[in-house]
Image (spheres, rainbow, N blue to C red):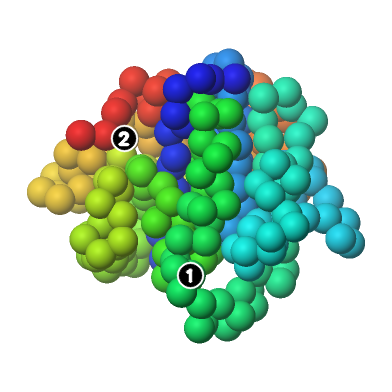
């Protein structure tokens, strides 16, 4: 385990289906393979990251929901689950998390619940990766209030490209009003289909864009059916099929991220 403060990275995009969850699970596993200690926090009520790591939710298991609710009897370490892979831990999500928005509506400091709960464990990991739901809900605001870096997956598709502007404006608003330490560490081109013209044209647009171009990761995540397959069996692709494109791309991303620090 690391003894410096963790790099706390939110994987966020208000659009669904752009590869957020797949990136959290597989980047986490690739960093773990590079001998980094990693904690994944699943903040999406659909708990796909939890499932993707092969963790089954059981009845009264403490989850991130209890942390968000500020349940005094449950502390962050109580919610940490060890996955099958050494050095890769998880704070699972819970379906009830969807209701947290309403439950917290009158609470003071409700956007800092996650930060308050996790502040003590920051130095126990090298990386903390946070998965977010596909909306700018209070859950996402909690993640962005706690993180210091945002990684933005962008599907190489016209709609996803167009949606980036709103996301960047949201990040700026949060930086201004809630979390001055927040910055975008990079934009990640995902679901890149080498055979289609549209994938190539959106990647070109991203590269040449004044705002996103300088932030674009060199690593591009290609479409790879092994990724979807591995999620189905609750394993990161790197531990499922080491020599797949998915495994190679996320390993490249892990290495690039390790060499890249926010300005
Ligand atoms: N590189 C990829 N190759 C193939 N399928 C992918 C890839 N990335 C994501 N997927 C699939 O696309 C869908 C959306 O990805 P997901 O990570 O769940 O998006 P989000 O979390 O942004 O909603 C999922 O079914 C996932 O398995
Ligand atoms: Mg998701």
Q: Quadrant of the C terminus?
A: top left
At 52% across and 61% down in the image, what residue appears?
113
Q: Is residue 102 left or right of residue 206?
A: right
Q: How many marks?
A: 2
Check the image and name the residue furthest to the front. Answer: 72
Sequence-wise, the earlier of marks 1 and 2 is 1
- Within 10 angstroms of label 2, few (less than 14), some, or many (20 or more) residues? many
Q: Give residue 98's position: percent from left, percent from top.
A: 63, 74
- The quadrant in which the N terminus is found is top right
Where residue 105 appears, as percent x and y from the top left, is 51, 82
CA gap, disc 1 to disc 2? 33 Å
Is 19 drawn above or below residue 224 in the view shown? below
Residue reaching furthest to the left: 210
Furthest-right residue in this view: 59
Q: Is residue 51 above or below residue 53?
A: below
Residue 241 visible within the image:
no
Residue 222 horizontal side relative to residue 39, left or right:
left
Q: Is residue 181 left or right of residue 69?
A: left
State whether residue 65 is above or below residue 238: below
- Between 226 and 111, the one lying in front of the other is 111
Residue 217 numbered mark, or none: 2
Taking the spot 55% from the left edge, 40% from the top edge, the residue there is 120
Q: Residue furthest top?
A: 35
Q: Quadrant of residue 96?
A: bottom right
* SS at circle 1: helix
Indicate the secondary structure of the residue bearing disc 2: loop
Occupied quadrant, residue 97: bottom right
* Label at residue 110: 1
Residue 69: x, y in percent? Answer: 63, 67
């Amino acid at each position: 385990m690391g003894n410096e403060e963790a790099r706390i990275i939110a994987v966020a995009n208000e659009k669904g289906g752009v590869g957020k969850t797949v990136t959290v699970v597989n980047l986490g596993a690739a960093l773990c393979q590079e001998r980094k200690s990693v904690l994944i926090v699943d903040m999406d009520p659909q708990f796909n990251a939890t499932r993707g790591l092969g963790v089954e939710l059981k009845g009264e298991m403490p989850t991130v929901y209890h942390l968000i609710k500020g349940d005094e009897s449950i502390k962050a370490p109580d919610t940490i689950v060890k996955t099958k892979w050494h050095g890769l831990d998880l704070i699972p999500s819970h379906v009830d998390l969807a209701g947290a928005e309403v439950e917290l509506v009158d609470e003071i400091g409700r956007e800092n619940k996650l930060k308050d709960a996790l502040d003590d464990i920051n130095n126990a990991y090298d990386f903390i990766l946070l998965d977010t739901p596909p909306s700018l809900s209070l859950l996402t605001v909690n993640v962005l209030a706690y993180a210091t870096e945002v990684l933005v997956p962008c599907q190489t598709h016209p709609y996803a490209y167009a949606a980036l502007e709103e996301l960047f404006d949201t990040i700026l608003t949060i930086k201004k009003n809630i979390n001055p330490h927040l910055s975008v560490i990079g934009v990640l081109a995902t679901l890149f289909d080498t055979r289609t013209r549209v994938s190539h044209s959106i990647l070109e647009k991203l590269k040449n864009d004044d705002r996103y171009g300088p932030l674009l990761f060199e690593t591009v995540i290609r479409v790879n059916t092994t990724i979807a397959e591995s999620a189905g069996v609750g394993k990161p692709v790197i531990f499922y099929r080491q020599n797949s494109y998915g495994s190679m791309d996320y390993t490249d991303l892990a290495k690039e991220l390790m060499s890249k620090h926010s300005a």
